[in-house]
Amino acid sequence: MKRPVIIDCDPGTDDTIALVMALAAEELDVKAITTVAGNQTGDKTAINGRKIVSYLKKNVPVAHGADKPIMRPLVTAPHVHGESGMGPVELPDPVTPTLDIKAWDLFYELTVDKSEKVHLITLGPLTNVAIALMKYPALKDGIEGITMMGGSACYGNDTPAAEYNIYADPEAARIVFDSGIPITMVGLDCTHKALLMKDEIDSMASVPGTGAKLAQDMMNHIYEFATRFGFSGAVMHDPSAVTAVIKPELFVTAPYHVVVETKGKYTTGKTVVDLMGVTKKDPNVNVVLDIDREGFVQLVKKLLKSYES
């Protein structure tokens, strides 16, 4: 049976690859895609989400969410994702319309209103989810769990302490982490090991189909960026989170108590993971620490082949 999911994202180059994978996966029933400001401004991530769905010819609704964090100014990442958010890739104008409903209202409509449990995959800042939980306290009973790309047990990539998705809206992240919803945190401890090497990317070039071509263009862009910072391959942040829902057996995880720092001078946005159990508090997050890279690469190749015509 397919697992019903909503994907909340800020497309985004690696978000694009993650969406290509998720929309091809026979294990997932993607109920909706919602967008949030993050990698680029809210208007750009919203149209990018619609462009991706239209280009892939998928009948999945897209809803626009928050245009800024709940308490802070928006911090985008054009140095990583380009001015459009799609790196060097230009997609045709979308035919997929945006829904006349905000992301947080759609979360409620697709879960509590329908008396259904849905798993939430988050690939960007957690603003939409936090707004939804504040507006609809009952929503926590409609979300089966959250698998998020974000955070780290040890270090950051936007600041020395904080990973970007959490740093971009730490107050929202804190609301989500404190919600009691089961969380799987796919952070930098894992994603920095989810590398696609140049020869692996090149070997996918023979795969036909629009989805495969779009993913390959993004992989090459990410590879060029990542290798400038000492990585040996393209770092697959968001695709790791999607993979964790499709094939959780590829990951090493452990339960820990995690809180989000919102007031630190040097540590705002840090996910403080109690690795040594010093607080004696019960675990609230399943932290992903490692990935079977070879298994991940094989899954990426398999999903891209799903787009063969």
Image: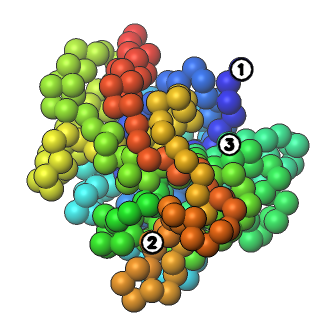
Work out whether residue 109 can be spotted: no
**Mark 1 or 2, closer to the camera:** 2
Which mark lies nearer to you, 3 or 2? 2
* Precedes in sequence: disc 3 or disc 2: 3
Foreground residue, 57 or 116? 116
Name the amino acid type tagged 1: Met
Tag of residue 119 = 3
Q: For this rendering, which residue is in front, 265 or 123? A: 265
> What is the C-alpha distance between the residues marked 3 and 2?
24 Å
Circle 3/circle 2 CB separation < 8 Å: no
Tell me how far mark 3 sits from mark 1, CA to CA: 14 Å
Q: Secondary structure at mark 2?
A: loop
The reply to whether residue 186 is visible in this rendering is: yes
Report, in whole angstroms, how far the alpha carbon at label 1 lies from the one at label 2.
37 Å
Residue annotated with mark 1: 1
On screen, residue 253 versus residue 99, left or right, reads left
Under tag 3, what secondary structure?
strand
Q: Residues within 10 Å of mark 1 (few under 14, many from 20)?
A: few
Q: Residue at x 68, y 24 (%)?
A: 2
Which residue is disc 2 drawn over?
270
Among numbered discs 3 and 1, the one appearing first in the sequence: 1
Asked where in the image residue 257 lies, by quadrant, the reply is bottom right
Residue in the image at 60% along x and 24% along y: 27
Quarter of the figure with the C terminus: top left
From the viewer's perspective, tell me whether residue 271 is left or right of residue 141.
Answer: left
Picture coordinates of residue 278 (x, y %)?
57, 71
Q: Give above or below for 91 relative to 172.
A: above
Q: In this rendering, would 186 be left or right of 178?
A: left
| Colour approach in the figure | rainbow
Q: Secondary structure at mark 1?
A: loop
